[in-house]
Amino acid sequence: MNDTKELHFSNSVIAVPLLFVLSLWVVFWLEVKLGIRFSNYGIYPQQLSGLRGVLLSPFIHGDIAHLYNNSLPLLVLLAALRYFYKEDTFWVIGLGIISSGLITWIIGRPSYHIGASGLIYVLVSFIFFKGVKSKHYRLVALSLFVVMVYGGLVWYIFPSVQSHISWEGHLGGFITGFVFSFIFKSVSVNNDRKYEWEQEDYDPSQDRFMQHFDEKGNFIELPEQTTTGEVEVTYDFKPKETED
């Protein structure tokens, strides 16, 4: 189904990212408070016990720097997802975690893969490709913003010289977001609005701007437009009140 709606801000645009990121910090706080590590609950590829990490790994982080580096992009990207693609928000998050996690489980190296970076790649990929496909100026602008801010992430979907980075999770997230941009059809903005020159009855000869160009496309100066006719000016007169 292809829904077109006008964008509008709601509290969930802030609440959804905050609650999700807060859950990550709560898990990390529990690790510190209880003095235990949840890393063994991450994705361990090609082992049945490692499948539990498909759902759990996004909530587990190695240290506070790892958690902090994932928190900021999640806040921005989840807010953008909720605002521009409201109907798809929870599907993209839920299925994105599962799909990217399964890909990681299939192709990953024999080690525990943890962190929410896979979901970040899902969001970056989905928002970018979805915006480009929509051809709506707001969504294309959002795609360009994602490229400018997070475009450098693309290098981390390839086997990295840094062995501690799960490029498999990044690649899984990138592929998932790309596929989702074709699967999910809803659009949160009205793409039916047409400019004057897109109307069927548009006549370029009556357009003041187009009149500045001749048949060869050369710019020409037009004489200044003047208006003639009588101008009627009306004044209201209110006599000054006299004192008794």
Image (spheres, helix red, strand yellow):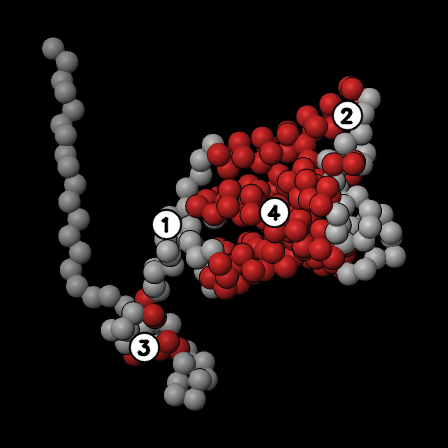
Q: Amino acid at mark 2?
A: Glu
Task: Point out the frontmost of discs 1 and 3.
Answer: 1
Q: Dots 4 and 2: beta carbons under 8 Å?
A: no
Q: Is residue 163 left or right of residue 53?
A: right
Which label belongs to residue 98?
Answer: 4
In the rendered image, residue 88, in percent from the top left (x then y), is placed at: 47, 47
- Left or right placement of residue 227 versus residue 194 in this view: left
Q: Tell me the kind of residue under disc 4.
A: Ile
Residue at mark 2: 31
Determine which quarter of the picture holds residue 71: top right
> Could you tell which of marks 1 and 2 lies nearer the N-terminus?
1
| Secondary element at image label 4 | helix
**Crowding near the residue tagged with mark 4, few <14, some 14–19, many ≥20 C-alpha atoms within 10 Å:** some
Per the image, the residue denoted by label 1 is 5
Answer few, some or many: residues within 10 Å of disc 3's Cα (few below 14, many 20 plus, some between 14 and 19): few
Residue at the far top: name it. 244
Q: Of marks 3 and 2, which one's residue comes earlier in the chain?
A: 2
Spatial separation of the CA atoms under disc 1 and disc 2 = 43 Å
Q: CA distance from mark 3 to mark 2?
A: 68 Å
State the separation of the CA atoms marked 1 and 3. Answer: 31 Å
Vertical placement of 74 versus 238: above or below?
below
For this rendering, which residue is in front, 38 or 229? 38
Of pointers 4 and 3, the one earlier in the residue sequence = 4
Q: What is the tally of numbered marks visible in this picture? A: 4
Type of the residue with mark 3? Pro
Q: Please give the residue where the numbered disc 3 appears in the rendered image.
A: 204
Q: Using a 10 Å C-alpha cutoff, classify the residue at mark 2 as few (fewer than 14 neighbours), some (14 to 19) or many (20 or more).
A: some
User: Would you say residue 43 is visible in this rendering?
Assistant: no
Which mark's residue is nearer the viewer, 4 or 2? 4
Q: Earlier in the sequence, mark 4 or mark 1?
A: 1
